[in-house]
Image (spheres, grey):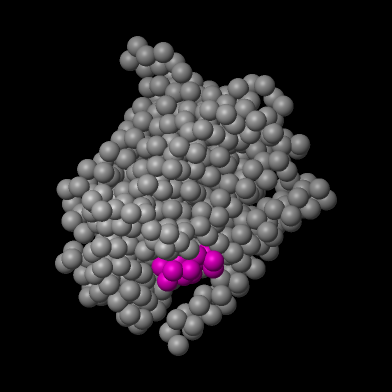
């Protein structure tokens, strides 16, 4: 178990950079192909763009289950790697794979049975509904690549190997970006599949990513091995995984519920507003990916140090990562403030979308620094084995406070004022995260 020893001995700034940079880059690439999907779909029509925005909450839910389970497995693996418990490492890895397969089966069944019901709950426009069902059903029925690739990427991350995790993500993202225009517009003699083509390109890219992650684990990860000989699923292992994983799933699902709720608030005003919010959310995710990379890097660092009982390294990791995250968030604020028209211009906007979106992006960008503190502290507490801080912090900033305020602002002041509700929700969430994480660390270090 020499490979992961850098988490015990490497100077913290160097460790953070070596682990987070590949994650940042890979997440940026992953987020990029969501944006590329929307850019190409927007060239079909605004209805097609609205359709992909409308079904995005269900895609977020699938991501939430995959990432949440993977984060739980990552945290438990990292702790046992730090403690050098080989038997538990093997059992946790096998259990994680079984859980990802079970999640796949559930979403496949929902893809066959529930896409029409979900879509018609949000729109009466038959053109938008048809596009939405075409896109969503393909993404759900063929979701195995997404969920399996996420789990095997977490196996790599748990030993501190974020580079090969990045390689597997890039393989899928590049595949998707290449195939998007080919399938959507029918290049090289293929039929033009429109929105269906975007979905097909997405799931093929996910399958390529999964194949790459499985192969890289087999060739490059001697620490985390799946062994079925004498394997038995243990309730205590599943409980440990979901002690961190379930709050993370809920945390990630909050984004899905929030987007669906905001879509429902905006749709009576304008379908263009729904299209804009989908565009904003993908742009924001793209610019927030470096912070997510830092957060995902801190989980194994903190988990390893916790398992090794090196509490000083835990504090050092948080103090190193937090200022970097704030700096990234401020850079994102500058970009949104200075170039809102350019950012929206990537998605073939009409005059109505520009009128809604340009001031909205500037208003929203003020909140990014507050969000970065909430996110990094939440990830850090997940590494310590408690996902509740991350869950509640996200719930406050994206759902519990934001959605009711957005409804009140829209009803009383119009959609141009909705975005100010983010200022209030982000500040309250940050205050909660600071106090809650301080309480957790005092309890552990006592």
User: In the image, residue 426 lies at what x, y percent?
Assistant: 62, 63
Q: Nearer the viewer, residue 229 or 315?
A: 229
The extreme right residue here reads 412
The answer to whether residue 203 is visible is yes
Using residue 264 as the reference point, say whether residue 237 is left or right of it: left
Q: Residue drawn at (79%, 53%), measured in percent from left and top?
A: 408
Instruction: Please tell me whether residue 17 is drawn above or below residue 357 in the rendered image.
Output: below
Using residue 362 as the reference point, say whether residue 25 is left or right of it: left
The answer to whether residue 366 is visible is no
Instruction: Please tell me whether residue 211 is drawn above or below residue 161 in the rendered image.
Output: above
The C terminus sits in image quarter = bottom left
**Occupied quadrant, residue 101:** top left
Please tell me whether residue 76 belongs to the stretch shown in magenta: no
Q: Residue drawn at (51%, 54%), measured in percent from left and top?
A: 249
User: In the image, residue 247 lies at what x, y percent?
Assistant: 52, 60
User: How many numbered tags mark residues here?
Assistant: 0
Q: Nearer the viewer, residue 426 or 147?
A: 147
The extreme bottom residue here reads 446
Instruction: Please tell me whether residue 5 is drawn above or below residue 173 in the rendered image.
Output: below
Secondary structure predominantly adopted by residues drawn in magenta:
helix
Please tell me whether residue 379 belongs to the stretch shown in magenta: yes
**Residues drawn in magenta:** 376-390
Q: Nearer the viewer, residue 153 or 27?
A: 153
**Occupied quadrant, residue 296:** bottom left
Q: Residue drawn at (32%, 40%), measured in percent from left and top?
A: 210
Using residue 185 as the reference point, say whether residue 254 is left or right of it: right
Q: Nearer the viewer, residue 401 or 232?
A: 232
The N terminus sits in image quarter = bottom left
Q: Residue drawn at (48%, 63%), measured in percent from left and top?
A: 243
User: In the image, residue 405 lies at what x, y percent?
Assistant: 74, 56
User: In the image, residue 319 lies at what x, y percent?
Assistant: 41, 76
**Occupied quadrant, residue 134:** top right
């Amino acid at each position: 178990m020499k490979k992961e020893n850098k988490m015990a001995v490497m100077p913290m700034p160097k460790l953070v950079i070596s682990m987070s940079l590949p994650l940042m880059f890979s997440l940026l690439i992953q987020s990029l192909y969501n944006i590329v999907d929307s850019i190409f779909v927007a060239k079909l029509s605004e209805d097609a763009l609205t359709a992909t925005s409308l079904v995005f909450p269900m895609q977020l839910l699938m991501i939430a289950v995959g990432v949440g389970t993977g984060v739980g497995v990552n945290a438990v693996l990292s702790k046992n790697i730090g403690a050098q418990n080989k038997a538990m490492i093997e059992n946790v890895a096998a259990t994680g794979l079984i859980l990802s397969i079970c999640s796949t089966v559930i979403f496949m069944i929902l893809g066959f049975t529930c896409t029409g019901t979900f879509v018609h709950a949000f729109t009466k426009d038959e053109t938008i509904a048809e596009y939405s069902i075409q896109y969503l059903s393909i993404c759900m029925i063929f979701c195995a690549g997404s969920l399996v690739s996420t789990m095997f990427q977490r196996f790599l991350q748990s030993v501190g190997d974020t580079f090969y995790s990045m390689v597997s993500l890039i393989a899928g993202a590049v595949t998707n970006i290449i195939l998007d225009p080919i399938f959507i517009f029918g290049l090289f003699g293929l039929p033009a599949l429109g929105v269906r083509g975007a979905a097909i390109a997405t799931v093929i890219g996910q399958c390529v990513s999964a194949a790459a992650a499985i192969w890289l684990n087999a060739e490059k990860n001697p620490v985390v091995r799946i062994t079925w000989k004498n394997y038995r699923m243990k309730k205590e292992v599943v409980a440990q995984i979901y002690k961190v994983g379930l709050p993370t799933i809920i945390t990630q699902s909050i984004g899905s519920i929030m987007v669906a709720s905001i879509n429902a608030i905006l749709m009576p005003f304008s379908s263009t507003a729904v299209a804009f919010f989908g565009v904003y959310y993908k742009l924001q995710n793209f610019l927030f990916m470096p912070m997510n990379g830092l957060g995902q890097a801190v989980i194994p660092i903190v988990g390893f140090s916790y398992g090794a009982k090196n509490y000083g390294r835990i504090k050092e990791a948080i103090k190193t990562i937090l200022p970097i995250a704030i700096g990234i968030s401020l850079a994102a604020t500058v970009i949104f403030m200075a170039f809102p028209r350019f950012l929206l211009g990537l998605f073939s906007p009409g005059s109505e979308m520009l009128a809604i979106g340009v001031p909205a992006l500037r208003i929203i960008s003020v909140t990014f620094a507050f969000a970065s503190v909430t996110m990094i502290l939440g990830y850090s507490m997940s590494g310590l084995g408690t996902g509740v801080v991350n869950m509640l912090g996200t719930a406050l900033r994206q759902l519990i406070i934001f959605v009711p305020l957005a409804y009140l602002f829209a009803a009383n002041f119009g959609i141009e004022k909705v975005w100010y509700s983010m200022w209030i929700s982000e500040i309250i969430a940050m205050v909660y995260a600071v106090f809650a994480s301080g309480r957790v660390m005092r309890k552990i270090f006592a």
